[in-house]
Amino acid sequence: FSVRLHSTHLSDDQITSKSKQQQKQTKKLLSIHYISSIMANTNLHGEDLIRHCGLNDKGKAVEQMDNQSFHRLIAVKLASHGFDVPHSTNGHREAENQVMQLASDLFRRYAEQSRLLTGHLNPPDRRIQDFLDDALSTTGVSIALPTNAINMDRYGMARKLSLPEDPSFDEFHNSENSSYKLCNGVLHNPFNDRRTTKGVFHIADYGLPVPADKIKVPLITYAKLLEAALQPPEDLNLLPYTSQWNNPVESMVSLMLRPLVCPEVPGVSPEKRLEVRFFVPGGCVSNLDFVESIFGNAGDPSLPENDAGIDTNHWTGTSGCVILAPHIRKLKKKDVGLPHISEATEEQKKTGMCWENEDELYNGGTPFKITLRDKRGIMVTILADNYFGYCKKEVKTQIGLSANIFGLAEEEHAGGAVAFKSYSLGTHFYPDEAIVGSSHTYEEALTLLGNTVIVHPTGYATDKKYNTIHILPEDIEVDLTAQAATWTKDGVQQSLRILPGHEYLHPSGYKIRLQKHPASTAYKLIGTAGEGTYCHKPSTVSGGGKSEISKSMNDAVIYGAIYISDFETDMKMVRDIIERDYSNCFKSEYAKLQARSPSRKILSMDRSLGSVVKLLTPKNEYTKEHLNFIESIPYRISSIVFAIKRFYKPTWREDWQSHFSVDIVNGAKGHELKLDGRKLAGSYLRVGHDHINGGWRTFKLRQDFISADKVQMEDDITASVVVPRERIKGLPTEYSMHPSLKISQNCEWRLFQRPDDAIYPGFDKQTEDDLAGEQIFVSNFKPIYEEEMKDLSERVDFFEIFTDPMKKHMHRCLKEGGVNMCSAKPRIWHGEITKNPRYLQVRPDVARPRDKYLAQLGTRLYRKLPATDPCVFPVASVIGGRRNNPPDEINGVKILPLCVFNPIHYQEIPELFIDYVCSVTGKSPSTTGAGSEGALTKGPFNAINATADLNNALVSMILTGYGGFSSAAGYIGPNYKVDHDISLLIPEVWCRMTPEERSPENLIKNGALEKLDDFEMDTPEGGKRTVLASRLGYRITDKFVSHYFGRIFDNPCAAINEEMLKPEVQSLEVFADGVDNLVEAERKSALNYFKDGTIKYACPLLKIILHVMAYGNYEGKQLDDPEIRAMFTRDAVLKSDWYKKRLVTKQQRDIVLGMRNIKALEDFLGRPGYQVEATRLGIHQRLVDAERELARVSSDSYLDDLVGTLGADPIVDDEE
């Protein structure tokens, strides 16, 4: 058999074993080293998925093999690299020692072959080495990538290597990291507790232009830094796994990733990925554990099945390399080729790229990263710090470059979720046409779902994958009192008992479930829509709500009593409402459109709770008399009506009032409403803090409100693609307003979460549940030893507040001993509790596959999609996030106010992109800086001129026609601290709005959005200054609040009051200062594009925006000039020469890539001894496909196919 352990492609006849006996005895041991093809596909299952990212098909973190097998694998790997592997002292591993002895000649033979092949690189390393040879050819510095680095070719190996093999040692420490073995995972605390964004990004003066917000570095300096980076000191190169061996291993370790760049568009194009190689010192192997946990392990780069160069259907043609080298922070400026200050340019003096004192350290000895890249799409980056966030963000940078080179795609700093509106149905569900429509039938649903369901004789079906999901006929009714669903089959009524934990689907995709109230013993019926609303949150600053948009609001809901003022008086008002005749509530033109008579009594079983809520909510269809009646009802009274409807039982008949009461308190009637002696629980939500007494502002939710079901789609690193709407099959009319649509996908398997609130025991339920799970990766937490864990678990005021999972975890820690962690105990860093505790959370849609499956099933039925067709969720709305702060002072440094936005703003494209170019933000605990985060919030992560990203984003927004909304986090005005309360509410509001209601044009027309205008302000000198408030665009009004927030709150105008809607009412001076600060930051950001010359790479529309930002006008015209405004329309863009050039650029790049792919496949077929491999991998068919693809992209019709897409940004002029 072939031993594929070496760093090159070797044919089957190039390696032989010593003897058949050796083969037989070592075959089982070495076979675990083989790897199945991962290639580019993330649609992995079973063992392949576990090997790729350590997750099984149920989304649970698991290990592919037991500890013993992993230790065998590591022993084989180290021995095959020529290292001295000591014999095991454990008796049960005697057989392994024997095998290792028998295989010793084989390992020596391999080591000898490796020496003979010194300098021969695997395919991705060869591509990177060729680039370095070319780029650094003028420096005189010879760089060679490591050929003997230990490759992490399966998920989990890096984690094993990050801690001592000896089970009696639970921790490892070196100059850069402290690692601890926990009973349920690992804790890694790097030297620095966070990344910095100031002066961190250095770029070699080579290839593409260096943006003004980055530091330009001489090419010779980059070469010398790279040379040093690849020579780590011995102590840093020591592999923790071997730290207790007599002869510890000192070696660099490596990893290959294949991150997503462009999502698949079913029926149009496959997903596209780049290749990224990591090289780190052995002592920093925990960084590879981190990045492979997020992006997955792409296997052994030496094996042809993992070679991106012949994965012609999925490769973008771009390659990346990341070298972790914290030790180079100690290098001196003089030693890396920087000039003396007397010989330096003015720019070098300003950026510190020179020295005056011979002992000056490069970058002052602080963390930095430096990169080398050009238009070929190859980038080699050195990271001079091992804080984990740098590694993740560098992959983000690599994805961004690849997307810009490949075209069609964007890498976005975004969050996002599909939200499915949900309602409390009370005790009864009736298939009202207004809810489920009239065009879906049970028989049609069975045809669509085919053999994915089991059909029962009584006339309903059960899903085969999840037997708790059922599809019922269109005439289904559900009665909570009877705990039954009923329908008719062949004229006979059928019945099915409804159970908690089960979902019952109407053929329209509408979902019904039975759910216990969190604060009482009562159950209720929940209804959830079949079609969701994908809320996309791009260009969202740190702390702006990227994660919160996809979090359930359930954890934020507070449960309390339902209050009544005076029992007799209020109950009389309630009875009047219940007994009122509503026959004539509709205007005549709407009355005839009603499927059911409006005369139905409020307590009739023919009227649902949702119907009652709608009846008492203002709508344009109602008569003036009915609207006046609704207006006269106090909020507390409508809340009581809804509560009575929710709990009403038919057996009460007209005697419903006797079931409701209040207690007698001190001889007087109380105010807490009770049902049959039991206190009723209302749901309340926090909306900020009271600025006077500091308490929470809580408001009652509507009786029929239930938090939306959500499927997370994004959180931080997003790959997206824009395609014409008609190319996506099976979409409903909800998307007809958008001629092109965006498809976005998360690039990560796990999310690097910062659980700010976990420091309060019991508050962050999700984090406590996650950290009590298995195979966790945590950072910046305090290592807790047995004595302290015992103390914490015995402190009732601390321990008893935790959720059950964390309590069980702490008890487990006591039982198993050793070092562990607690969710409420971050590490102490520089004498203070860190504000940046972190852990890797399995992506929620991966961790809860049933939820995603159910969401897709409901959507499939709603859209009438066959089970064999893909179910795509395009973006429906764009809602960015901004973090605001009041005036403040930290360590004597004044923080300028930035609190000018009300809860939701809308900006037309020019104003929106003024905001996007600058991306100003308030304070955030994620980084050490505050202020502008650069274009599209990607300043610290963009390795090329930001005009490429901005051009792409601008074209994307115009082609799709999405409205540019944004939400506020942190503060609204100087007085209202809202944290992420608004961020949580956004998807709840948006999914309860129709596409027409979300239309900015309609919102403006109906007075739900108001435009802000510039105004004059007195100056201290007695003059006037203009405050450019028009930059803020439009903001929501009280009409928006009463109408749309009224679908959530009983009293929406109290929750979102006038001071929040108009922050200038809180303080006009702070508001004006905030606008001035914003405009000044925007001006400075724009001037950089003129300073570094990258203004010439901006598309014409972006040039207009940048000129206005920097100089207040464009060719003497203001931004509101009709001629300028007309240029920002879709038709104008499609007809423009610059857009057509983008399409031609994309075609030209695809032709070049296609020719490169064909050559790679032909070269592979021409290799001697590779015939079997070529057949196994289907290379001949790949070549046929590649030739067909080249013909397609070379045709004139391909340009027509590209219309409505992003094409590709030229990045720089052709001559450059």
Image: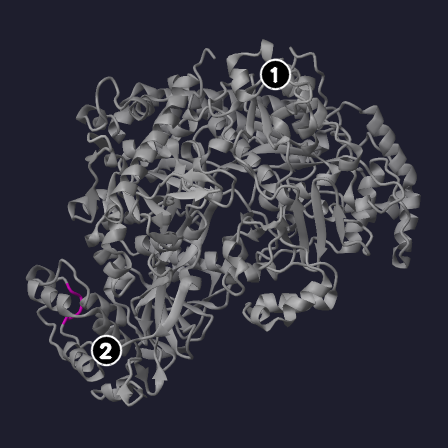
Q: CA distance from mark 2 to mark 1?
A: 77 Å
Q: Residue at x 12, y 77 (%)?
A: 580
Asked if residue 437 can be seen in this view, the reply is: no
Circle 1 crowding by C-alpha within 10 Å: few under 14, some 14–19, many from 20: many
On the picture, is 1074 further left or further right than 1118? right
Q: Residue at x 16, y 70 (%)?
A: 633
Residue type of the residue flagged with mark 1: Leu
Secondary structure under tag 2 reads loop
Instruction: State the image quarter where residue 1177 is shown.
Output: top right
Relative image position of residue 301 (x, y in whole percent)? 68, 34
**Image position of 537 with respect to 279: above or below:** below
Instruction: State the image quarter where residue 1027 is shown.
Output: top left
Q: Nearer the viewer, mark 2 or mark 1?
A: 2
Residue type of the residue flagged with mark 2: Ser
Asked if residue 454 can be seen in this view, the reply is: yes
**Image position of 242 with respect to 864: above or below:** above
Q: How many marks?
A: 2
Quadrant for the N terminus, please. Answer: top right
**Image position of 1178 with respect to 865: above or below:** above
On the picture, is 1153 further left or further right than 149? left
Mark identifier at residue 565? 2
Q: Nearer the viewer, residue 147 or 206?
A: 206
Residue extent of the magenta highlight: 594-598
- Which residue is identified by label 1? 219
Q: Residue at x 23, y 35 (%)?
A: 1030
On the picture, is 115 further left or further right than 322? right
2 or 1: tag closer to the N-terminus: 1
Relative image position of residue 628 (x, y in whole percent)? 10, 65
Relative image position of residue 666 (x, y in whole percent)? 31, 88
